[in-house]
Image (spheres, rainbow, N blue to C red):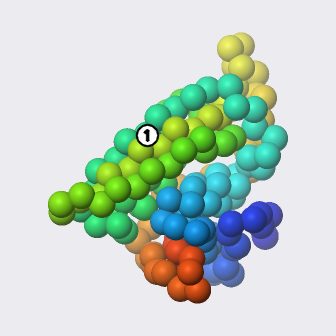
Amino acid sequence: MFEEKIGYHYIPHTADAKFEAFGKDISEAFKNAAFATYNIIIDTDIVKPVIKKTISIKAKRDFSLLYDFLEEFLFLLDTENFVLSDIESLDIHEGPGEYLLTCVCFGDSIFDEDKIRKYEVEGNVKSVTYNDMNIESRDDKVYVTVVIDL
């Protein structure tokens, strides 16, 4: 099973990875969901904070915002070999009829400039799914549940 960290835990699932991430507010829960997603394939604690990325997303629903946010990280992994190290800030604002998310994060490329692997990646994350996705407030925290297609 995947290593659990503070802010999320993995839930047994038949074929895919499922986790529940939580935080004092929705921003912290989304942040922990990003780490839960990446920690399926790499220990983010060993990734050096070399590259800075800014992610901006608009969505009409909170579920779509969570989906698009996590998919953006998978896009960065697939297109730029970016692996997450730290999230400096993550702000979510609800405007009229839409949610706005801005995230500043740090990470590194899996490969160096000579295409030599710097980090071992285990497995493959194909996509985020809407299957069993949930966002709820309980016990003065926000919880998000996500299933990742492996």
Secondary structure of the residue carrying tag 1 is strand
Look at label 1 and name its amino acid.
Ile
- Residue 13 visible (yes or no): yes
Q: What residue would you read off at disc 1?
A: 55
Q: Residues within 10 Å of mark 1 (few under 14, many from 20)?
A: few
Q: Answer with left or right where residue 124 lies relative to residue 58.
A: right
Residue 71 screen position, x and y as percent: 45, 52
Q: 102 or 24: nearer the eye?
A: 24
- Residue 37 visible (yes or no): no
| Extreme residue in the front direction | 140
**Residue at position x 79%, y 46% in the image:** 45
**Residue at position x 70%, y 55% in the image:** 39
Residue 140 screen position, x and y as percent: 56, 80
Q: Quadrant of residue 17?
A: bottom right
Q: Is residue 115 above or below residue 75?
A: above
**Residue at position x 28%, y 66% in the image:** 61
Q: Answer with left or right where residue 59 lies relative to residue 55.
A: left
Quadrant including the C terminus: bottom right
